[in-house]
Image (cartoon, rainbow, N blue to C red):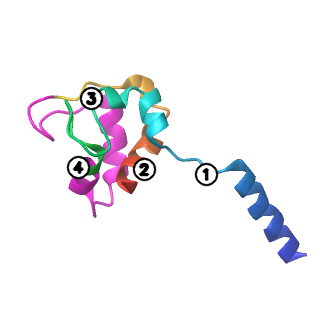
Amino acid sequence: MKTLTLVLVAAGLAIAGPVSADEALAKKNMCMNCHSVDKKLMGPSFKDVAAKYKGNKEAEKILAESIVKGSKDKFGKVPMPPQAKAAGDSAALAKWIMSL
């Protein structure tokens, strides 16, 4: 019975798919207007952001907050304006960025 339950739960999760962000979510939130995955545009590449925060246990929290509230002087003189419309996606986006 336990095995059957585990199989059914695993099947349900597989069908539902993971709840994660990807480049499509970044495009939806217009992040790609200033950022790219691997090249500096107006803002740093997402890979550069991930490298800067690598090993920081608070990285996802810091990035999610920067997405919503904006930031300045973290990657040069060009500030990142607040993206309040992305508030619902900011945690998922931060997690995705740190996965790069």
Say what secondary structure mark 3 lies in: loop
Disc 1 designates what residue? 18
Residue neighbourhood size for the residue with mark 2, other residues' Cα within 10 Å, grouped as few (<14), some (14–19), many (≥20)? some
Say what secondary structure mark 1 lies in: loop
Q: Tell me which residue sits at (66%, 50%) in the image.
A: 17
Disc 3 designates what residue? 34
Residue neighbourhood size for the residue with mark 1, other residues' Cα within 10 Å, grouped as few (<14), some (14–19), many (≥20)? few
Residue type at tag 4: Asp
Mark closest to the chain's N terminus, 3 or 1: 1
Say what secondary structure mark 4 lies in: helix
- Name the spot of residue 88 as percent of width and height, x first: 50, 32
Mark closest to the chain's N terminus, 3 or 4: 3
The reply to whether discs 1 and 4 touch (Cβ–Cβ < 8 Å) is no
Residue type at tag 3: Cys
Residue 17 position (above or below residue 72): below
Mark closest to the chain's N terminus, 4 or 2: 4
Disc 4 designates what residue? 48
Residue type at tag 1: Pro
Disc 2 designates what residue? 95
Residue 78 position (above or below residue 100): above
Farthest-out residue, left: 77
- Name the spot of residue 49 as percent of width and height, x first: 25, 48
Q: Tell me which residue sits at (21%, 40%) in the image.
A: 44
Query: In the figure, is residue 91 to the left or right of 71?
Result: right
Residue type at tag 2: Lys
